[in-house]
Image: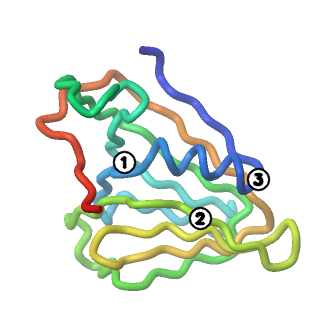
Amino acid sequence: MEQLKLVALDADDLEIVSAHVQDAVIQIGAFDWRPKEKRFLIEMNRFVWEKAGGIFRKHNERRRSILHFDRVLAVRSSGIDRDKRQDVLSLLTIGFAEDDAPAGTIELLFAGGGSLALDVECIETRLTDLGAAWAASSRPAHGA
């Protein structure tokens, strides 16, 4: 399968990106906030849901990817110890709350209750796969 490249410019687009990064694993040290550039980057190993197929499919993959947010004014975190750079988080979802259109807050929620809030002028998000996929030993599971 080709490497994935997605762009989100509104809340509906962001939902699509969120679906593709669900269950991505991220080291806390992979958060890169560049305030002068109004940019926030996250390197991740995303689960390749688009290739996972049905519930009984045995072939599972992960890919190295980067999630890139532009027009970011501020970044806040809750429940994440930024000093534990080697700790790994599992991304559950990304949402958007509009404040003063088109501005708002992009919220990333992680398993275990941690979150990141990005205050943005507008939604400008990109997801880009960086390389080849590798076999994942298991598939993420979610309780009902």
Q: Is tag 3's residue or tag 1's residue first in the polypeptide sequence?
A: 3
Image-based side of 106 in relation to 26, left or right: right
Q: Residue furthest left?
A: 137
Q: Which amino acid, mark 3?
A: Asp
Mark closer to the observer (3, 1): 3
- Number of residues whose C-alpha sits closer than 10 Å to that of mark 2, classed few (under 14), some (14–19) or many (20 or more): some
Please give the residue where the numbered disc 2 appears in the rendered image.
95
Which color scheme does this rendered protein use?
A: rainbow
Residue 118 lies, in percent from the top left, at 61, 72
Q: Residue at x 32, y 43 (%)?
A: 45
Q: What label sits on residue 10 in the rendered view?
A: 3
Q: Residues within 10 Å of mark 1 (few under 14, many from 20)?
A: many
Crowd band around label 3 with a 10 angstrom C-alpha radius: few (<14), some (14–19), many (20+): some
Q: Which mark is residue 143?
A: none
Three-letter amino acid code at the position of disc 2? Gly
Residue drawn at the location 77% of the way across and 73% of the way down: 98
Decide which of tag 1 and tag 2 comes sooner along the chain.
1
Side (left or right) of 125 relative to 86: right
Q: Is residue 33 above or below residue 12?
A: below
Q: Residue furthest bottom?
A: 78
Residue at the disc numbered 1 = 44
Give the Cα distance between marks 1 and 2: 18 Å
SS at badge 3: loop
